[in-house]
Amino acid sequence: MLWDSTFIRGTGSFLPPRVSVEDVLSGSAISAGSASLKLSDWASLTISRDYSAAEMAGMAAVDALKNSGCHAGDIGSLVYAFLDDQEHFAPVCHVQRVLGVPDALAFELGAASNGGATGIVVAAGLLRSDPSAGAAMVTAAGRYQAGRLARWQESLGIFLSDGAAAAVLSREGGHARLISSSHTSASELESLVAVREDLGDGNIMLAQKTGLGPYLPIIRDAGVRTVKQVLEESGVALPEVAKVAVTGVGLAQLSALILEPLGIAESRTTWSFLREVGHVGPSDALQGIDHLLRGGELRGGEKILVIGMGIGFRFTTLLLEVCDQPALN
């Protein structure tokens, strides 16, 4: 889908302190030198000792609003992407209160790790449909508590990390223009992530037991399809893309699913950033966009490809064009 006059006007992020992989695994039965960890290539992850997911989302939202130059009254809709929040039944209402936007259309979006990228598409659609709204905001956050899921998901190659990110969308220009988007699902694999009580080994999803290997061709082809559709519709060739914001799965999994099939070098992606902060749930895509736009390395006219993916298995790909505005640090 091609977009017209839709911009990311500001971004924000909140990440708690980083903890090294060795320290996280200290005293556990898992060896930091195991083959699967080495292939995944994680260095550290972020762990919140003090803040809930909703509180981190509120801080990221405040950061994004300030970065955008918009006022709270401009926000017509507020999308909160989350996954399995165990601390708040209505986390988007916390963000509403923090921002002071009680009249914004506010709701939670459950799209797993694809939530941030999906949230941009949803927020852009809401902005397009409401001429009276000056802006829309998408937030994404996650905090993982002991007892539900283990931090290290060996079969999936991910470290579950804590944090939040946000973006403000506007029609009136911004740091990047949304050019196109595409989405699809390999929904024939949805049974792999149904909660089960009979696995008997501490896992609650079949995907944790089997890993992604047996289903790699199906998942890979879905992701590649969304990327090719976005590029074809926008008339942009992959070599013209300056940077690729990816989802924080382990390097081995990322290479097999995305980098190798598309011929994308790791150095062109946000992996070097994500390997230091872990898989921050639904906010990976927004974290990557914030990192790239505020890093000061990109120039006006350069393109960013955003590849979001999540269990289910879902993909959302976005193409952005950096505008001629200075990056904010």
Image (cartoon, rainbow, N blue to C red):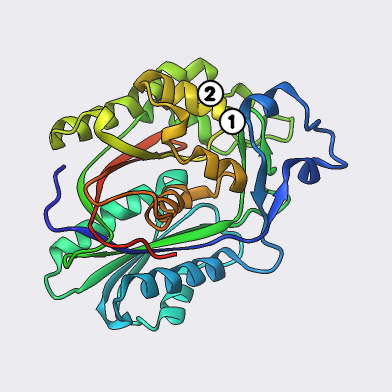
Q: In the displayed structure, does residue 51 sit left or right of residue 202?
A: left
Circle 2 sits on which residue? Answer: 212
Q: Amino acid at mark 2?
A: Leu
> Secondary structure under badge 1?
loop
Locate residue 229, reporting x and y percent: 21, 30
Q: Quadrant of residue 171?
A: bottom left
Locate residue 93, reporting x and y percent: 44, 74
Q: Is residue 307 visible?
A: no
> Secondary structure under badge 2?
loop
Instruction: Tell me whether circle 2 and circle 1 mark residues in contact (CB < 8 Å).
Output: yes
Circle 1 sits on which residue? Answer: 156
Q: Is residue 14 above or below residue 254?
A: below
Q: Is residue 263 above or below residue 243?
A: above
Locate residue 42, reporting x and y percent: 64, 36
Q: Nearer the viewer, residue 73 or 107?
A: 73
Q: Is residue 170 above or below residue 2?
A: below
Q: Is residue 236 visible?
A: yes
Q: How many angstroms separate mark 2 from mark 1 (CA)?
A: 7 Å
User: Which is nearer the N-term, disc 2 or disc 1?
Assistant: 1
Q: For the point 46% across and 60% down, which residue is it?
A: 165
Q: For the point 84% across and 39% down, which residue is it?
A: 28
Q: Amino acid at mark 1?
A: Leu
